Image: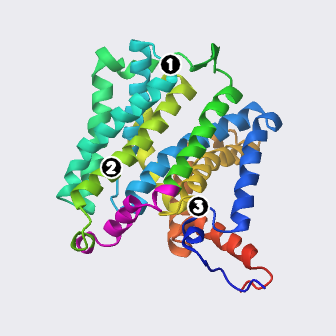
């Protein structure tokens, strides 16, 4: 008779999928992702691909902010570094995308480490301001280094090619990007079962106490910035191969704020938080477009207010979640699965 959720072995306690509902739920999700391109139209597949890219980026921010406690407002700019590095390397070297992507990830991780150096001496609001400055610096360099980035005119690249087939359609891009996103999320889930992940959590909870018990703050803070930036670089590389055209305005401060808002709503310091957050930031504008489109016959000028409505919706939802569910949508999801796992003895 199942009357509680307990673990009898270390292996069970350290498992990625700790209960049968989670295991079957993950299997159902994978099956749904496989079938989606065959069952949905091109626009739905395009949105799902965007969700996957945002999930990778927000997972990197979750490593840095959610698990290590280092708040960053430069994550969107780091995604831009990955995207532009991908386009430049592909255009200059002409190497396959599976070589360009790791190189772009390495470049972005290096840039993130450079801007992570202030975290060794400052924290809290001061670190947030430092990452904000990094965002402005990166976007400024992209805009004004015209000989490399083509400045405000943007830059284009050829589509990824697999066995001589160019991935140009939405289902083809989906088949490339979504599996990479799933593996990236699984890697993050596994990371926090290791010594490195536990060191990140210790630093978040109290860096002074972590240092006393032997956690090297210099090493692990820089490692957190490097990993978070690597995820941003991976998201940027996938972004580049998805849209094939880049502009500096795509990676300005607003993108970093969207990522941070998604992490708050989705659930900070939870592996599924970035997934729910990505769905949130992608679907809210589409839902508002549908609502305003429905109201257009009554007021033809109402479409002009779609962009301000997006900002207002983000702000209101963040406030609501901070007040009523500060752990985000992932906490609600966890409670649902816990109830299913313990049924019929659920509290």
Q: Which residue is mark 2?
A: 225
Point out the tag, 2 or 1, that comes first from the N-terminus.
1
Report x, y in % for residue 312: 53, 55
For the residues labelled 2 and 1, the Cα–Cα distance comes to 27 Å
The kind of secondary structure the magenta stretch mainly shows is helix
Q: Which residue is mark 3?
A: 16
- Is residue 192 located in the magenta-colored stretch of the structure? yes
Q: Quadrant where the C terminus lies?
A: bottom right
Name which quarter of the figure residue 105 lies in.
Answer: top left
Q: Nearer the viewer, residue 171 or 25?
A: 25
Relative placement, left or right, of 108 versus 297 is left
Q: Which residue is mark 1?
A: 96
For the residues labelled 3 and 2, the Cα–Cα distance comes to 24 Å
Decide: few, some or many residues near mark 1? Use Cα within 10 Å; few <14, some 14-19, many ≥20.
few
Verify CB contact (< 8 Å) between mark 2 and mark 1.
no
In terms of secondary structure, where does tag 3 sit?
loop
Question: What colour scheme does the image use?
Answer: rainbow
Q: Residue furthest right?
A: 39
Point out the tag, 3 or 2, that comes first from the N-terminus.
3
Image disc number at residue 311:
none
Q: Magenta segment range?
A: 190-209
Label 3 vs label 1, nearer the camera: 3
On the question of residue 165 being in view, the answer is yes
Please name the residue shown 50% across and 66% down the image: 319
Please name the residue shown 66% across and 41% down the image: 48
Verify CB contact (< 8 Å) between mark 3 and mark 1.
no
Verify CB contact (< 8 Å) between mark 3 and mark 2.
no
On the question of residue 262 being in view, the answer is no
């Amino acid at each position: 008779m199942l009357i509680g959720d307990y673990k009898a072995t270390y292996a069970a306690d350290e498992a990625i999928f700790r209960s049968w509902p989670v295991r079957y739920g993950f299997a159902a999700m994978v099956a749904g992702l496989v079938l989606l391109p065959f069952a949905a139209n091109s626009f739905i597949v395009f949105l799902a691909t965007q969700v996957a890219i945002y999930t990778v980026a927000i997972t990197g921010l979750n490593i840095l902010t959610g698990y290590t406690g280092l708040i960053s407002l430069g994550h969107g700019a780091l995604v831009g570094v990955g995207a532009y590095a991908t386009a430049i390397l592909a255009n200059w070297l002409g190497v396959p995308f599976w070589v360009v992507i790791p190189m772009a990830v390495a470049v972005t991780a290096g840039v993130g480490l450079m801007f992570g150096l202030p975290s060794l001496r400052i924290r809290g609001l001061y670190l947030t301001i430092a990452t904000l400055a990094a965002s402005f610096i990166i976007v400024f360099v992209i805009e004004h280094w015209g000989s490399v980035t083509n400045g405000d005119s943007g830059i284009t690249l050829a589509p990824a090619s697999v066995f001589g087939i160019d991935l140009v359609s939405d289902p083809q891009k989906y088949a490339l990007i979504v599996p990479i996103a799933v593996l990236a999320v699984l890697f993050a889930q596994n990371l926090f079962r290791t010594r490195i992940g536990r060191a990140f959590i210790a630093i978040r909870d109290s860096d002074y106490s972590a240092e006393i018990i032997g956690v090297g703050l210099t090493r692990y803070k820089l490692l957190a910035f490097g990993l978070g930036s690597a995820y941003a670089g991976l998201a940027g590389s996938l972004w580049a191969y998805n849209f094939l055209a880049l502009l500096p305005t795509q990676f300005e401060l607003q993108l970093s704020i969207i990522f941070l808002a998604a992490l708050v709503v989705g659930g900070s310091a939870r592996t599924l938080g970035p997934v729910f957050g990505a769905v949130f930031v992608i679907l809210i504008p589409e839902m508002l477009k549908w609502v305003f489109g429905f109201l257009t016959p009554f007021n033809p000028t109402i479409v002009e207010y779609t962009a301000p409505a997006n900002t207002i919706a983000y702000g209101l939802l963040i406030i609501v979640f901070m007040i009523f569910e500060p752990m985000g949508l992932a906490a609600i999801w966890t409670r649902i699965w816990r109830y299913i796992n313990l049924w019929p003895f659920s509290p």
